Amino acid sequence: MSLYPTRTLLRHVGALTLAVACLFCGSVQADEPGTRLQMAKQLKMEPTFLERASNGANMAVDLALDLVGVRYRRGGSSPETGFDCSGFVSHVFKSMGTILPRSAREMSKNSEVIRKSELQPGDLVFFNTMRRAFSHVGIYLGNNQFVHSPASGGEVRIDDLREKYWGKRFNGARRVNAE
């Protein structure tokens, strides 16, 4: 199953939820399909911590998916010149206002350790691809999918954690506590 139809379905469900809320709360106006966070702002309600965290994770996923197809470049950290794995992840989080260390290894040390079973969209996934722990990093999308900038000659793409190559090299998962 592809991730894209799921994202489209979730956006439609969000729009339907907002539309129903608008019917019951006549004062709420919806310019475009929105999230619970946008609805809370319109209703002058403070979003919960969970809603803010979820919104940040969704933003990380959306920003990462917008960069699919950007070419790999060792040491690269911008869409114009290309990305290596940690440059890609750093760029996504920097776009959200969160500064991460530049290397995958340092990212692993400066984020919260989580179990593979606890993975949520926006979490970081790490791999041993160069005969050393935490030598590669990507952003988890959900449904065992992750987005990353894999190697020379490649480009930012989506892969599956269950693929034999990635499964054998999985090092762990981390959660970034973005402010």
Image (spheres, rainbow, N blue to C red):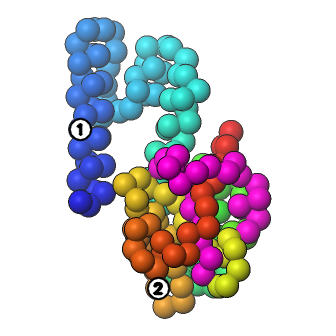
Q: Can residue 98 be seen from the camera position used here?
A: no
> x and y percent of residue 134 in the render?
68, 71
> x and y percent of residue 98 in the render?
68, 50
Magenta region, residue range: 105-129
What residue is disc 1 on?
12
Residue occupying image coordinates x 49% and y 14%: 44
Estimate the spatial distance between the alpha carbons at disc 1 and disc 2, rounded to whole Å: 33 Å
Residue occupying image coordinates x 60% and y 57%: 173
SS state under label 2 = loop
SS state under label 1 = helix
Q: Which mark is residue 31?
A: none
Residue at the far bottom: name it.
153
Give neighbour class at mark 1: few <14, some 14-19, many 20+ (Cα, 10 Å).
Answer: some
Residue occupying image coordinates x 29% and y 41%: 10
Number of numbered discs on residues? 2
Placement of 47 over or under 88, stated as above or below: above
In terms of image quadrants, where is residue 171?
Answer: bottom right
Look at the image and tell me in which quarter the C terminus lies: top right
Residue occupying image coordinates x 26% and y 61%: 2
Is 113 contained in the magenta span?
Answer: yes
Amino acid of disc 1 = His
> x and y percent of residue 6 in the render?
27, 49
Q: Can residue 153 be seen from the camera position used here?
A: yes
What residue is disc 2 on?
154
